[in-house]
Image (cartoon, helix red, strand yellow):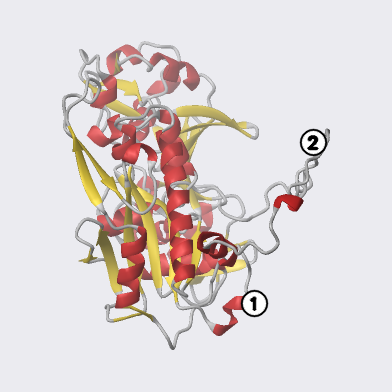
Amino acid sequence: MRASARRPATLSARLIGDVTLDVREDGDVAARIEGFSVRLGRLSAGASARAGALRAGLPLTSFASGRGVGKEIDVLVRALAKRGLIEYRLERGRKDQAVIEPQVPDYWPSLPTLRDTDTLVLSRFAYLRRRASEMVLESPRAGALFRIADARFAAVLALLATPRPIKWLRRQAAFPGVELLALLVDCRILFKVDARDKGLRPTEGDASLVMWDFHDLVFHARSTEGRHANPTGGVYPHADAVPPLPLVRPAWPGKRIDLRPALRADAPLSATAKLLRERHSVRDFDPARPITLTELSCFLDGTARIQSIVRMPPGPDDGGETAEYSMRPYPAAGASYELELYLAVDACDGLAHGFYHYDAGEHALVPIEVDARELDTLFQGAQLAMGVSAPPQVLITIAARFGRVSWKYSSLAYALILKDAGVLLQTLYLMATDMGLGGCAIGSTNIELFAKMTGIEFHVEGPIGQFALGRSAATAESGAMG
């Protein structure tokens, strides 16, 4: 084992690059970033002086006592961390081993006890990639990613593709020290196994996790909000590098066949064609005329209710299980019907403000008790996504029970789920149009918030889309089309 790996490692908290702390003479402290300011409370004179060290980094052990100035700094650092303004530096022998970037608001580094007899292996969801000029190690299951400062650690990761006992790792020239290994175990980038374990896929996590392919879980976690710290939404990340693609694709060469003469000028539009042409996104709803429970019942009945159930006898490839399939108003891949509807109700005549699950079999709403602040956060996210000042009357979250599809399909399960969500969103649009209601699809969802509200792990059942529903305001007709 290298002498440097025997030196004690220091784990420090420090401000991320563009954040500054503004501490006034009276002790009032605020964080400033990109022209914005967030007030964080008030500090004593001693804590104010010590807080200045957060630019370079303060060892976590220096304020872990929970008393006096240490307690004040601990409260301050945790408040900064919840806002995504803190990163953590693991240093050994005055050299960085890794910088830890939190990906979820409640991440706090922990070092579980590891013994020399413990056997570790690399998660099948972990991956090392280049980000600009840095190498980062991450996983969709992890609460943080690691900027690798010591290139030799990549050799250790390669070794951990096979389960290895820590006492064996200690003998390797690139052994990084037990602290970094513990941090990676805490983030589920590494996990403990029995030394004789050969079935690593079922060993890591629960039965629902077994059914996830690597690329699907990465796509799910990184294309939604809640489990990463990347910019999300319409931020035009490539506007300075490349021009936008043209609205209409440049025509292919060859003789063009004009289809317009084949249209009968006197032929009336079908009801479906008329709905498709009338469909548009409505983002503003009439606060004086909320949707009614009767209308909501008819809307759900026409879009998502189970119409019939078919039970198929065991086949040669289904593990001897009787398969159940349902018929609903929209098509689904393999008739899996993995999508569930959760309704956040702000204003509905005949239905209380709250959070509900739609039971498609019984055509019933089941209330779910949630924290009022989390429900408000859900509505605020929808408002922000639509660019409006008021929440929708009803916000429908489309969630997927992923195992309904991944139990059968390999490599394309998540892609099929997203296709199903697109079909359902169009169905919701057409029903809203037909009923004279307003609706708007919302592409962004927060999978971590949904997990907290429902108590369901993000890889078991999670949101993949939202739909705002209500009675259109008078000004909606002049709003943006979508």
What residue sits 58% from the left and 67% below the top?
A: 278
Tag shown at residue 478: 1
Report the side of 278 relative to 260 (left or right). left
Q: Position of residue 147 (x, y in %)?
A: 52, 34
Quadrant where the N terminus sits is top left
Considering only vertical position in the picture, is 367 above or below 110? below
> Which one is in front, 251 or 261?
261
Residue at image coords 49%, 33%:
98
N-term-proximal mark, 1 vs 2 = 2
- Horizontal side, residue 329 vs residue 203: left or right: right
Q: How many marks?
A: 2
Of 64 and 197, which appears nearest the observer? 197
Name of the residue lying farthest toward the bottom: 288
Left or right for 14, reference 192: right
Q: Quadrant of the C terminus?
A: bottom right
Q: Which residue is mark 2?
A: 252
Residue at the image point whose x is 41% and y is 32% from the top: 9
Q: Is residue 124 left or right of residue 306?
A: right
Hey, which quadrant is residue 220 in on the image? top left
Query: Which is more toward the observer, 11 or 50?
Result: 11
Amino acid beneath label 1:
Ser
* Percent position of residue 328, x then y: 32, 51
In this rendering, the label closer to the viewer, 1 or 2: 2
Q: Secondary structure at mark 2?
A: loop
Identify the residue shown where x is 42% and y is 69%: 379
Cα separation between marks 1 and 2: 36 Å
Q: Are marks 1 and 2 in contact (CB under 8 Å)?
A: no
Q: Amino acid at mark 2?
A: Trp
